[in-house]
Image (cartoon, rainbow, N blue to C red):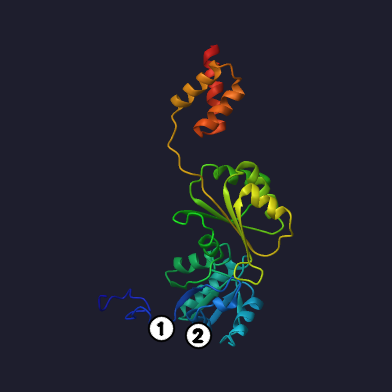
Amino acid sequence: MLVGMSTVGPNEGMREGDGPTIAPGQLVVVATPIGNLGDLSARALEVLLSADVVYCEDTRRSRTLFSAHGATPRRRLQTLHEHNENATSVEVIERVARGELVALVSDAGTPGISDPGARVVAAVLDAGLRVSTVPGPSALIAALSISGLATERFVMEGFMARKPGERAATYESWRHEGRTVVFYESPQRLTTTLDELAQLFPSRRVVVARELTKVHEEVVRGTLAQVATTMRAREVLGEIVVVLDGVAERARVSDEVVAAALDESLARGLTLRDAVALVVAELGVSHRETYALALRRRAEGAS
């Protein structure tokens, strides 16, 4: 490390394993337990106790966390949620600019990950001020890590849309998605979502992780058809993360190869619909694109 550099962070000179040194004049994003309150790290607790102010999604939930660790915050807890985040960002910037240590927590997990926090972080950074983190629990990472599905590449979709058209568009984008897909869903809509997905991708593997780290933790694995049937037969409660397997990568099949397969099938006397279905099954190509190609070739042959 270069001596005299003004950009050195507050942990200058620390060795790996040293205790934390949190400097004033910054916003610290603090991850909190997603269920089991014992998952709060020692460093996270120290920051929350030393902060000049702690902004919480719900102060009642945060007080429960403090109480579980026999602790009391230095100042009155402040609220920062999705409805006041923009307005409160100004207040946070003023506090950090005055040299205060400001901590930010959500009800559970990491702020900003499908929870309030991302906008205030962006605002503080835009103001040229420091933002740091005390990393820790995250429901999406917890579910992904125990899913048994590929973890090298994945995409996080947040909470599923409620409008049918938006949901259909999302499903279509997953048709050729090779990465593992992670999303959140409410208990009330889970079975509907699984049924819709099972109609499109019945053999795709899926994991439904419910109430992670809590007393009633449950992880259901199988194909979409299997898991949709399982979850339909029971009452679903709690916080839910769904992890969906990506499609296997295929070599791109050229239009010439598809066209030749279509011509061969039609020459055998199959109807256009049956020929398309056979080619799609044999080559693993898109039904929509194959059907469109078949219609074009029929039109060209008639002209």
- Residue 149 in the figure: left or right of residue 84: left
- Residue 50: assigned label: 2
Amino acid on which disc 2 is placed? Ser
Q: Residue at x 49, y 23 (%)?
A: 261
Quarter containing the N terminus: bottom left
- Position of residue 141 relative to residue 230, above or below, is below
Residue found at x 65% / y 72%: 215
Q: For residue 65, which quarter of the picture?
A: bottom right
Are there few (<14), some (14-19), or many (20+) residues within 10 Å of tag 2? some
State which tag comes first along the sequence, 2 or 1. 1
Q: How many marks?
A: 2
Residue at (51%, 42%) from the top-left corner? 176
Does 264 appear above or below 156? above
> Are there few (<14), some (14-19), or many (20+) residues within 10 Å of tag 1?
few
Discs 2/1, front: 1
Residue situated in front as seen by the camera: 149 or 41 = 149
Q: Between marks 2 and 1, how big is the CA–CA gap?
A: 14 Å
Q: Where does residue 56 sit, x and y in percent of width and height?
A: 59, 74
How far across and how far down the image is residue 264, in percent?
50, 19
- Which three-letter amino acid code belongs to the residue tagged 1? Gly
> Which sits in the foreground, 139 or 208?
208
Spot occupied by residue 250 in the image (x, y as percentages of width and height): 45, 39
> In this view of the protein, which residue sits in the foreground, 282 or 15?
282
**Front-most of residues 151 and 185:** 151
Q: Is residue 24 left or right of residue 105?
A: left
Q: Position of residue 268 (x, y in %)?
A: 55, 17
Residue wearing tag 1: 19
Q: Can you say whether 299 is above or below 279 in the image?
A: above
**Element assignment for label 2:** helix
Tell me, yes or no, whether the two marked residues, 2 and 1, touch with CB atoms within 8 Å.
no
Q: Secondary structure at mark 1?
A: loop
In the image, residue 26 sits, relative to residue 210, either above or below, namely below
